[in-house]
Amino acid sequence: MPSGKTHTRIDLFFLVVIIGIGACFWSPLVEYFGRDEMVEYGTVFVIAYLFGTFLLSPDLDLKASDPLKNWGILRLLWRPYSHIFKHRGLSHTPIVGTLTRVIYIFVVVYALAAMTNAFFDLGWKMSFDDLKDMDFKIAIWALAGLCLPDLFHILADHTLKNAR
Ligand SMILES: [Zn+2]
């Protein structure tokens, strides 16, 4: 199986390729989406892609892995995830696997924030109302940035069975 470092290298290699392709098609992209929007979408995409590569990798379904280490002390948050999802099961499914991690970390962070809010009586507004105002297009670009490195990870797992 490719090691965590190999996965990171593969993901970063493809990020460079994607940025290269994006640069080649920059004019038509800007014409279609607008310059400011394209800079915004591109930035969101790259940040999401790096977040996916270093922190939200499919290998969070393991008890120990490089992406887990990257969370530092917060890796404890992923303990239940590795119990729920068996290695290379649903977590290693394109798009769906990525969504399991996005939803999982959202639920965990929301639950912790809600508990902190109630315990310390902080009066935080914890409603989902603000989600309505979320820019749908930005969300799609962010999701694409999170899903793509996972896709390369899954492909590498399948094709580089004997690699390290
Ligand atoms: Zn894997």
Image (cartoon, rainbow, N blue to C red):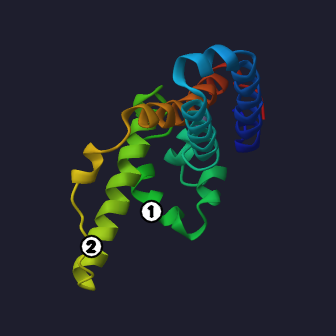
Q: Badge 2, how many Cα within 10 Å: few under 14, some, many 20+?
A: few
Q: Label 2's element? A: loop
Q: Between marks 2 and 1, how big is the CA–CA gap?
A: 22 Å
Amino acid carrying mark 1 in the image? Leu
Front residue of this view, candidates 59 and 43:
43
Q: Quadrant of the N terminus?
A: top right
Left or right: 31 as drawn, with respect to 88 = right
Q: Badge 1, how many Cα within 10 Å: few under 14, some, many 20+?
A: some
Residue positioned 50% across, 39% down in the render? 87
Instruction: Look at mark 2 in the image and give the residue it sits on.
Output: 124
The vertical placement of 76 against 49, above or below, is: below
Question: How many numbered marks, from 0 up?
Answer: 2
Residue positioned 21% across, 59% down in the render? 127
Front residue of this view, candidates 25 and 96:
25
The vertical placement of 108 against 18, above or below, is: below
Front residue of this view, candidates 2 and 36:
36
Q: Quadrant of the C terminus?
A: top right
Amino acid carrying mark 2 in the image? Trp
Q: Where is residue 34 drawn, in percent x and y?
A: 55, 25
Assign ligand 1 to one image quadrant. Answer: top right
Q: Which mark is residue 144?
A: none
The vertical placement of 55 against 117, above or below, is: above
Q: Which mark is residue 77?
A: 1
Left or right: 18 as drawn, with respect to 124 = right
Q: Can I make out residue 71 in this image?
A: yes
Q: Where is residue 152 drawn, in percent x and y?
A: 63, 26
- Based on the displayed image, in which of its 4 quarters is residue 32 positioned? top right
Left or right: 8 as drawn, with respect to 111 = right
Residue positioned 72% across, 27% down in the render? 19
Q: Label 1's element? A: helix
> Extreme bottom residue here?
120
Q: Where is residue 129 drawn, in percent x and y?
A: 21, 52
